[in-house]
Amino acid sequence: MEKTIEESKQGESLVLENKAQNSKKLFIESYGCAMNFSDSEVVASILSENNYNTTTILEEADLVLINTCSIRDKAEQTIRKRLEKYNAVKRDLNPKMKVGVLGCMAERLKTQFLEEEKIVDLVVGPDAYKDLPNLLQEVESGNDAINVILSKDETYGDISPVRLNTNGISAFVSITRGCDNMCTFCVVPFTRGRERSREPESIMAEIQKLWNTGYKEITLLGQNVDSYLWYGGGLKKDFGNASEFAQATAVDFAQLLENVAVTFPKMRIRFSTSNPQDMHEPVLHIIARYHNICKHIHLPVQSGSDRILKAMNRLHTREEYFNLINRIRAIIPNCTITQDMIAGFPTETEQDHQDTMSLMSHVKYSFGYMYSYSERPGTMAGRKLDDDVPEPTKARRLQEIVDLQREHSAFRTQEFLGQTVEVLIEKESKRSADEWAGKNSQSIMVVFPKENYKAGEFVNVTITDCTSGTLKGVAVGYSEMN
């Protein structure tokens, strides 16, 4: 529960869709949000057309790429430690190995990486992955290579991703890139650029390919999926200047979500991440209307204090957030709601912290990602606000938030006792080879005896026990989604 998104990684990825004619080996490791993992699949696809197959063995790689996160200083320190590891392997075992840094940290630090990290041969920002073949030619010629130019229209909609670290059941499908919200603590607008949406036809084509190859669940992905708006291409801010025809034929997130649900009625659909100011009621009605759209909304709030929310430039108030929660509960009664929360934002007082605790007590989230504030260079908060909350105070407040969330998570899982829920079997349980594990529609992990069921099947499970993070039960038959 308290493990943050950016602390997860993909290193020992499965080797899939390799081509016999390719002679070079790519080892790619991803850190950060789901978008980074999705981007790594795009990178693997681009390089598979340029003589590279993926490998799980670092020591044998011709090219090592690390897809990076800049959301917190801790994430960046993790990346630097991995670069030290690569340096040791390159020095001692594989001197011909080339090493590149991708993603948000590459975009933020740019040439600094080439200057600081002697083993780094190339630096590539999130919008420049199609330039990788050219950059690698520069590297082979003995030159350092860098491309961190942000794009106004790149969505990689024409790239068919190579699925990495996959169970063959669930996959990410990117629908937007960038963010326009400019929260004062966040580097995303500076590392991923302005918000733009992907062509609906390319999204549907990617999902169709996944369905044809046996996938049962997709997550529509973006920094802010609720802002999805396709009217022919370009930045969302230009929509008002679009032609009347373009505006009349525009596709928003509610329409896209419904199109996917109707076209793929046996495919389970998730989406992430939402922003409170952009979560519009039509989306809620679409979620409620279609069984195959999961009843879970990740709705970051960051603070329960109006004063801190204003300092964060969150563009919603505590009351507006409560009103949205009330609408979700009314329209989708069985919906789980999850959170992101920051403890110790600059100028946060004890009263501000208590406002956060009271907001949590009002909502009682199912689970969440909780952080102490980490100043990010270049953000408005980093430039304008002193990081004035002492680290021990941040740590204490964060622990209080985590402890309260544990209570609420236990409360929410207990609500499922005696209920029968639909579960998509994803994998074997970590605790027992005799049990399956998979999530229900509300994104809670469910564990139950295997019997004769198989991975990738939808099963109805009656819940008999629970912990604060897991439901336990007994399968009572297949669901209507099979």
Image (spheres, helix red, strand yellow):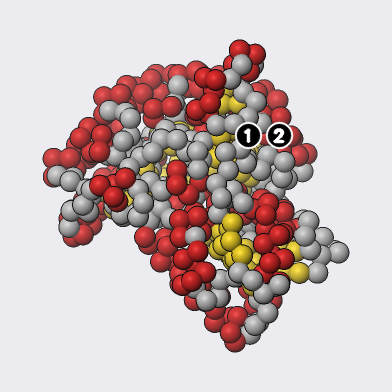
Query: Where is 248 relative to 316, above or below?
Result: above
- Residue 204, given in percent of the width and then of the height, sits at 70, 32
Looking at the picture, tell me which residue is in the foreground, 349 or 209. 349
Give me the disc on residue 242: none
Three-letter code, disc 2: Ser
In the image, what residue occupies the spot 79% across and 63% down? 51
The reply to whether callout 2 and callout 1 are in contact (CB within 8 Å) is: yes
In the image, what residue occupies the spot 82% across and 60% down? 19
- Residue 189, given in percent of the width and then of the height, sits at 45, 43
Judge the density around disc 2: few (<14), some (14-19), many (≥20) Cα neighbours within 10 Å: some
Query: Where is 217 relative to 233, above or below?
Result: below
Give me the disc on residue 202: 2
- Residue 258, given in percent of the width and then of the height, sits at 61, 22
Is label 1 in a helix, a strand or a loop? loop
Q: Which residue is mark 1?
A: 198
Check the picture and name the quadrant holding the C terminus.
top right
Three-letter code, disc 1: Arg
Is label 2 in a helix, a strand or a loop? helix
The alpha-carbon separation of the residues under discs 2 and 1 comes to 7 Å
